[in-house]
Image: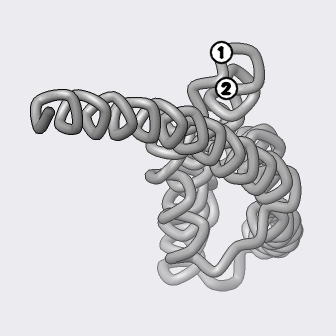
């Protein structure tokens, strides 16, 4: 941490006194360290991007958290911010879908997951676990809706029969 930013100062010293052998050696070591850090940073960002692409947002956040604050780039910061937000949305969506299995509030769950569903759609991400739970919830809602409609129809038929009987009785 204390070495961060030192390369720039050594460069300035060398511009004033280019024949200082110790400064040149320090410059070479600092440059090598900076290149090593850049390569490590690139590997971390690539790994986090791969985790994001497979909707493993919480793991991507953990991976990006390994980057020291003074080395984080704008791209890494943007990726971290997106993954933090997406991890929360994903967790909320999966929780809503799992809760719907016991509460049988399938319609409410399908409404609750819209934000996450839209997010992965916009980013063209494919979340298999979410998709399976979502489709299961959709199917359960369709079945529930069908049962409700089926229970309404016999009641309507009974009401119509009563109305017909009453109207026939009034005609007599």
Q: Position of residue 121 (x, y in %)?
A: 57, 74
Residue on which the image places disc 1: 103
Side (left or right) of 76 relative to 52: left
Task: Classify mark 2: residues with Cα within 10 Å, few (<14), some (14-19) or many (20+).
Answer: some
Front residue (pair 160, 148): 160
Up/down of 89 relative to 29, above or below: above
Query: Residue 40 is drawn in which quadrant?
Result: bottom right
Question: Which of these two is toward me, 44 or 133?
Answer: 133
Residue 26 horizontal/vertical position (percent): 80, 63
Residue pushed farthest front?
A: 172
Q: Are marks 1 and 2 in contact (CB under 8 Å)?
A: yes
Disc 1, SS: helix
Q: Which residue is mark 2?
A: 100
Q: Does 102 sit left or right of 103 as displayed?
A: right
- Quadrant of the rendering where the C terminus is positioned: top left
Q: Residue at x 75, y 62 (%)?
A: 52
Quarter in which the N terminus is drawn? top right
Residue 139 x, y percent position in the rendering: 74, 52
- What residue sits 60% from the left and 62% below the top? 76
Q: Between residues 172 and 121, which one lies in front from this camera angle?
A: 172
Q: Which image quadrant for residue 93?
A: top right
Q: CA distance from mark 1 to mark 2?
A: 5 Å
Question: Closer to the camera, 78 or 43?
Answer: 78
Residue drawn 53% across the image and 43% down it? 149
- Callout 1 crowding tier (Cα within 10 Å): few <14, some 14–19, many ≥20: few
Q: Is residue 138 above or below residue 148?
A: below
Q: Which mark is residue 4?
A: none
């Amino acid at each position: 941490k204390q070495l961060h930013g030192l390369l720039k100062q050594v460069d300035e010293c060398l511009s004033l006194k280019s024949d200082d052998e110790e400064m040149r050696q320090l410059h070479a070591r600092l440059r090598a360290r900076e290149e090593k850090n850049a390569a490590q940073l690139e590997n971390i960002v690539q790994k986090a991007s791969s985790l994001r692409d497979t909707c493993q947002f919480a793991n991507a956040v953990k991976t990006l958290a390994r980057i020291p604050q003074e080395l984080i780039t704008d791209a890494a910061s943007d990726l971290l911010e997106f993954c933090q937000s997406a991890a929360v949305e994903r967790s909320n969506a999966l929780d809503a879908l799992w809760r719907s299995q016991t509460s049988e509030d399938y319609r409410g769950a399908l409404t609750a997951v819209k934000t996450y569903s839209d997010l992965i759609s916009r980013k063209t991400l494919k979340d298999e676990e979410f998709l399976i739970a979502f489709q299961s919830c959709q199917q359960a809602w369709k079945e529930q809706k069908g049962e409700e409609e089926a229970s309404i129809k016999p009641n309507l038929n009974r009401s119509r029969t009563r109305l017909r009987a009453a109207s026939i009785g009034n005609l007599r």
